[in-house]
Image (cartoon, rainbow, N blue to C red):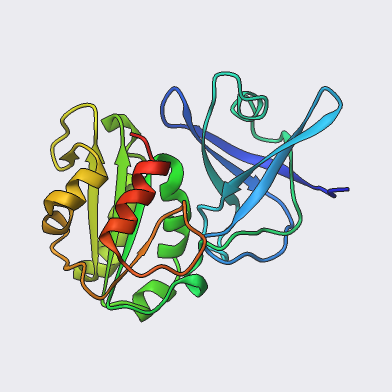
Amino acid sequence: MQKWVEGTVVNQKRWTQTLFTLQVEAEVARFEAGQFAKLALAVEGEMVARPYSFVNAPNERPHEFYYVTLPDGPLTQRLCKLQAGDAVYLAPRPAGFLALSEIPDGENLWLISTGTGVGPFLSILKTEGPWQRFRQVVLVHAVRHAEELTYRDSVSRLLGEHGEQMRMVSFVSRESKPGALYGRIPLAIEEGRLEAAAGVNRARSTDASPSRSRRVAWRPRRALRCLRRLHRL
């Protein structure tokens, strides 16, 4: 039977009608940036749990989770109503393989995300690992609407800290947004627009996305299949 650690909500931030960030104080085992924890609440006498990636770096507190609510989600419809001081439960041991220890060496690192998938990459980027291992790091974040381009302050801070070593490319698929590419990532890869916007050559690069858990070097066709299958914007 799953044992749970009781945590305390520190803050709840609402970005849009459906996007939230939950900050929680809880004593769980140390995690590697990119991993996730299971969050749970009691629903009709049973614990309902879902995995959510850490946005905070391993040495940062409180723990932070970025999530989207689902209309009929038994957990998210309750998570979004939590306030500071409320209890929420976490699995004691984080898990997951979206971590730099699972990524092969390469010249450049591409971190390709859609929606809330940017969360674990922010955790990774707050650590020293990517900046020590890769010449350039490209963060790609794709959303449907411009208001969903969240965590811009965190991204701006990272860009300021790492200068030309970091590149950021944003996509908005359902409206035009100054400074963001219009459309979807797979087509931009095919047309060369993603590489041009980043100003970084894909050759000898390493690609990571939240939909993968194995070591994967950048292979454009494989990346396209993965994105088409798992990230519908």
Report x, y in % for residue 109: 32, 68
Whole-percent x and y of residue 172? 24, 35
In the rendered view of the protein, which quadrant contains the C terminus? top left
Q: Residue at x 25, y 76 (%)?
A: 204
- Residue 207 vs 150, above or below: the answer is below
Residue reaching furthest top? Answer: 71
Q: Does residue 178 appear left or right of residue 26 in this picture?
A: left
- The residue shown at (57%, 64%) is 58
The spot of residue 219 in percent (x, y) is: 30, 64
Drawn side of residue 165 relative to residue 114, left or right:
left
Identified at 73% across, 38% down, the residue is 40
Front residue (pair 144, 77): 144
Query: Considering only vertical position in the picture, is 66 above or below 210?
Result: above
Give left or right: position of 9 versus 205: right
Which of the 4 quarters of the picture holds residue 8?
top right
Compared with 155, 33 (above or below) is below
Q: Quadrant of residue 80?
A: top right
Residue 19 appears in the rendering: yes
* Residue 20 pos. (x, y %): 50, 33
Q: In the image shown, does 230 or 115 lie closer to the viewer? A: 230
Residue 157 can be seen in this image: no
Q: How many marks?
A: 0
